[in-house]
Image (cartoon, rainbow, N blue to C red):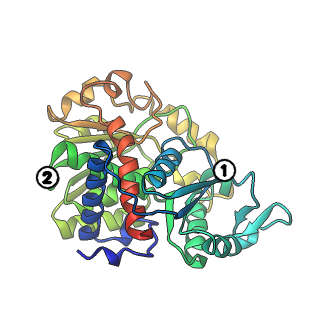
Amino acid sequence: MKTDRFRGRDFLTIADYGREEIETILEVALDFKRKFAVRESHRLLDDMTLFMIFYGMSLRTRNSFEAGMTQLGGHAHYLSPGEIYTPALDEEVREYRTESVSDVARVLSRMGHGIAIRCFGKAVHWVYGAGQEVLDGFAEWADIPVINMESDIYHPCQGMADILTMREKLGHLEGKKFVMSWAFSPRSQKPLSVAHSALQVTSLMGMNITVAHPERFDLDPRIMDLVRANSEKYGGSVEVVDDMAEACRGADVIYAKNWTSRHYLPPEVDKPMFEEVKKLFEQNRHWICDEEKMKLAHRNAIFMHCLPADRNFEVTSAVMDGPQSAVFDQAENRLHAQKAIMALIMG
């Protein structure tokens, strides 16, 4: 595939890229990983700048992007909304505190070569989809590529690291069973984005997908429709169950991750109803990936989580630190997958 077809494009959701394009990103990521291991220079973005706007905390995302830009020969600027005029949609603009997304996007476009944004949750009053609206606004007004570092709907960079890890661990992925399971957490305020992007990319690869969650934790029906369409096209399957143990039986990959209930977030309700969500959470404390559930999977199955994981709530430490855990491989692969994305769209 000609890689110039990537140049100048945004990376907002995996759905914007076809399977062949995703395969190309993975090939480039693996090449970068090899070069990094043997300390071979791969400075494809010399003297280029990535502006990173974080509306929330980050460990893996911030450091993988900063390290990645350095290794590619460029530089990443960290922009905290609390230290700049916070970029806001027009209806949220407040004098001397915020600045319109359209203005910020056009200014940064004249100073650098890419804009990466993380926006969800409290920053947008937990209105489901509002974080993605901010990213879409940047993409509309910027003249340089915009990268989604996580919104309330999508986390495509995590999805790329996830599928890179599965490819390394399992080889050929078509027909392998991928389980995306809700898991309990004491904290009820987590987005749905990781699950959405993991399902998007695994369905592109023809995996047999099982989604497991208790009642009222169903994922976005628009995403599920896309996942089913991908599966029909590429030969996989999709099922949804309400029993975690049932889902884990015969699995090749178990991805246990907490997310909130979108039914208690605006615009479905007037304001976030996290007390009601907590009641739902408490009813489902038994949704944890432990050694017994891993025994139900294939002997060589892997456990995955995007991190940070709520140990001994979402997953036991015995599983997370055990021989089947791939969580730190996933974290490492954030670096290489994102370098491939940046090199292809910014280079």
Q: Amino acid at mark 1?
A: Lys
**Vertical placement of residue 105 versus 311, above or below:** below
Q: Name the residue tied to disc 1.
A: 122
**Vertical placement of residue 199 versus 222, above or below:** above
Q: Name the residue tied to disc 2.
A: 172
Rendered location of residue 238, percent (x, y): 24, 57
Q: Quadrant of residue 235?
A: bottom left
Position of 303 with respect to 120 (left or right) is: left
Rendered location of residue 9, percent (x, y): 44, 74
**Vertical placement of residue 168 versus 341, above or below:** above
Q: Amino acid at mark 2?
A: His
Mark 2 or 1: in front is: 2
Rendered location of residue 136, percent (x, y): 55, 71
- Note whether residue 196 is visible: no
Quadrant where the C terminus is found in the figure: bottom left
Image point (39%, 48%), residue name: 334
Classed neighbour count for the residue bearing mark 2: other residues with Cα under 10 Å, few (<14), some (14–19), many (≥20): few
Q: Earlier in the sequence, mark 2 or mark 1?
A: 1
- Note whether residue 282 is visible: yes
Q: Nearer the viewer, residue 294 or 216?
A: 294
What element does badge 2 sit on?
Answer: loop
Image point (20%, 41%), residue name: 251
Q: Are marks 2 and 1 in contact (CB under 8 Å)?
A: no
Q: Quadrant of residue 101?
A: bottom right
Q: Residue furthest top?
A: 318
Image point (33%, 60%), residue name: 200
